[in-house]
Amino acid sequence: MRLLSIIGGLAFALLNVLPTIAAEPVRFALCYDLSKAYTFVSPQIAQAARDYAELLNSRGGLEGHPIEVIVEDHGNEPQRGIECYERLKREGVMVFDMLSTPVSRAVLPRVMKDGNILIQSLVGRGDAVDGDVFKWVFPIGPTYWGQAANDIGYIKQKADGNLKGVKVAFLYVDYPFGQEPIGILKTLAQKEGFDLQLFPYPLPGNDQASAWTQIRRFNPDWIISWSLSNMHVIASREMKRNGIPIDKYISVNWLNEVDIKNIGQDAAIGLKRGTNVAGGSSQPLVQEIIKELYDKGKGNGDRKFTDDVYYNTGLAMYSITFEGARIAIKKDGWPLTPQKIKDGLESIKDYGVNGLMAPITVTAQDHGGGGKTRVEMWDGAKWVPQTDWIAAFQDVVWNVVKEQSADYAKSEAQK
């Protein structure tokens, strides 16, 4: 009897364990640039995605299914991004993230044709928020178009609501990422009456001297900069050389604490950035990950990155993405399909993103989720918010979105 009891107990235990072991994973492909242009940010975002997946897996995964995060390098080369997509698609992956504007643009037509999911958070073409046209693309969170519009919204606040005669310089690396906001900035300049001038500089971004000489002559009230990593450091030196106050500078979100350190904490006082997420390791989810993973030696990278705004960016992106997949399983059951995941993502409503972003609502028509950012200023020791989470000029942004997405739909129909 005792033997039978032991065997029965083991059988009962196995019955409880086997479903967890046998559950198929939900797979996410992060085809990232891990070797060239985006190495200043891609490791932190991949690390955050893996950490959050591990935390959720320790608590049962997504409705009982473990999360598998696959990270591969495309070197910011569109063809390698396409190869990564095609290979993992054959292996059954349905959700892809390229974290690169040129690579996302290259892969997008294939994703649309195949009916898979492309996560395009914080990169890529701004009109992809139009879910009526880009049915399988999810640029959840603020696009570059929305972020640029919000920067103009901030400048309008500082100008007491009247932008007429205000001089705005747009400094950008002459590359798809840098060029992305130009259309929306020109539209807003025409509507609001501010004087917009464009100042490109070439890759790899080390030679900005000519652009800054021209900016000095223009003598702008504000400088909006679409630059990356060390490009900001070079910009700060050029501003000093040309006698331009750094408090005129508003950076795109790709500027972090490492860049501030390289500029100099005191030299950077007054510098501003638009940000999509709340930074710092004091965020509750970051603290939870530190406690459950890093304090136990289980982290998926260097602990120092957990105090980086780019790490929080990864947590925000994958908090949303994993939530969409969780909703899909809960709503429509297993096995997952791209259509179910699409429906799940489009069912996200007032999701607080673990406090890392403004609440997100995604619909079949709006794949962006609201587009709110805020402007922060470096005070010598920390970032101080200068605005609430805002989404400015949404009517203008969406007019341009609809125009551009209609052009895309028309061109695709003619192929």
Image (spheres, grey):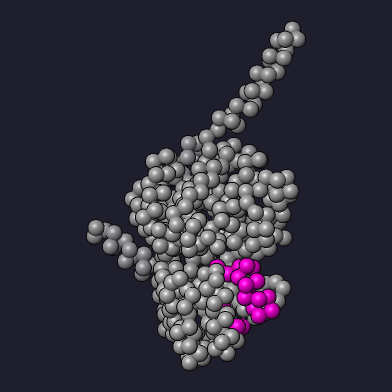
Task: Write down the quadrant of residue 385 in the picture.
Answer: bottom right
Query: What's the residue at 42%, 64% (across, down)?
Result: 125
Query: What's the residue at 58%, 69% (across, down)?
Result: 255
Specify the farthest residue to the top: 1
Task: Write down the quadrant of residue 183 in the picture.
Answer: bottom left
Q: Which of 184 and 215 is in front in this view?
A: 215
* Residue 262 in magenta stretch: yes
- Answer whether residue 125 is visible to the viewer in this image: yes
Query: What's the residue at 51%, 48% (across, down)?
Result: 71
Query: What's the residue at 43%, 72% (across, down)?
Result: 203
Specify the farthest residue to the right: 2
On screen, residue 310 versus residue 303, left or right, reads left
- Residue 176's spot in the image, x, y percent? 41, 68
* Residue 156 in magenta stretch: no
Magenta span of residues: 246-268
Q: In this view, does 65 lie above or below 131?
A: above
On screen, residue 288 versus residue 411, left or right, reads right
Q: Which of 22 and 242 is in front in this view?
A: 242
Q: Nearer the viewer, residue 233 or 87?
A: 233
Name the image quarter holding the C terminus: bottom left
In the rendered picture of this protein, how many numbered marks are placed on residues? 0
- Residue 132's spot in the image, x, y percent? 39, 58
Q: Nearer the viewer, residue 226 or 8?
A: 226
- Residue 7's spot in the image, x, y percent? 68, 14
Q: Is residue 275 above or below residue 97?
A: below
- Residue 326's spot in the image, x, y percent? 56, 44
- Answer whether residue 184 is visible to the viewer in this image: no
On screen, residue 54 versus residue 117, left or right, reads right
Name the image quarter holding the N terminus: top right
